[in-house]
């Protein structure tokens, strides 16, 4: 079963770095968002198995996004 990973970071370089670490295993689908608000919207859309959040982002911080994600799924696995 293919696992879904969501990477939320306003830095393209940081998202690319995480993707490069993960892409060694082709059994993952990777989704990206560039701010906390878009991250929450993408979380709703794809229901990822794990989410990586940056702390400091425009529009909505990683902590605010984490709070919103936990309202959607209290068992969500999120790394900030």
Image (tube, helix red, strand yellow):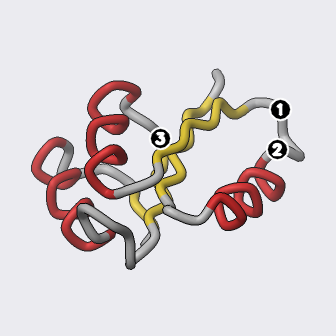
Q: CA distance from mark 3 to mark 2?
A: 16 Å
Quarter of the figure with residue 72 = top left
Mark drawn on residue 26: 1
Image coordinates for residue 77, horizontal then vertical, percent: 39, 55
Q: Earlier in the sequence, mark 3 or mark 2?
A: 2
Q: Residues within 10 Å of mark 2 (few under 14, many from 20)?
A: few
Viewport quadrant of the N terminus: top right
Q: Which one is in front in this view, the residue at disc 3 or the one at disc 2?
A: 2
Q: CA distance from mark 1 to mark 3?
A: 15 Å
Residue under circle 3?
49
Image coordinates for residue 52, horizontal then vertical, percent: 50, 60
Mark drawn on residue 39: none
Q: Residue at x 74, y 56 (%)?
A: 16
Asked whether 73 or 42 is in front, the reply is 42
Residue under circle 2?
23
Looking at the image, the residue that sits furthest to the right is 24
Q: CA distance from mark 1 to mark 2?
A: 6 Å
In what element is the residue under mark 2? loop
Relative to 79, residue 39 above or below: above
Q: Residue at x 71, y 60 (%)?
A: 18
């Amino acid at each position: 079963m293919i696992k879904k990973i969501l990477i939320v970071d306003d830095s393209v370089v940081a998202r690319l770095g995480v993707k490069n670490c993960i892409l060694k295993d082709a059994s993952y689908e990777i989704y990206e968002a560039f701010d906390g608000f878009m991250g929450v919207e993408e979380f709703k859309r794809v229901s990822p198995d794990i989410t990586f959040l940056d702390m400091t982002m425009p529009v909505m911080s990683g902590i605010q996004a984490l709070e919103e994600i936990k309202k959607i799924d209290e068992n969500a696995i999120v790394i900030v």
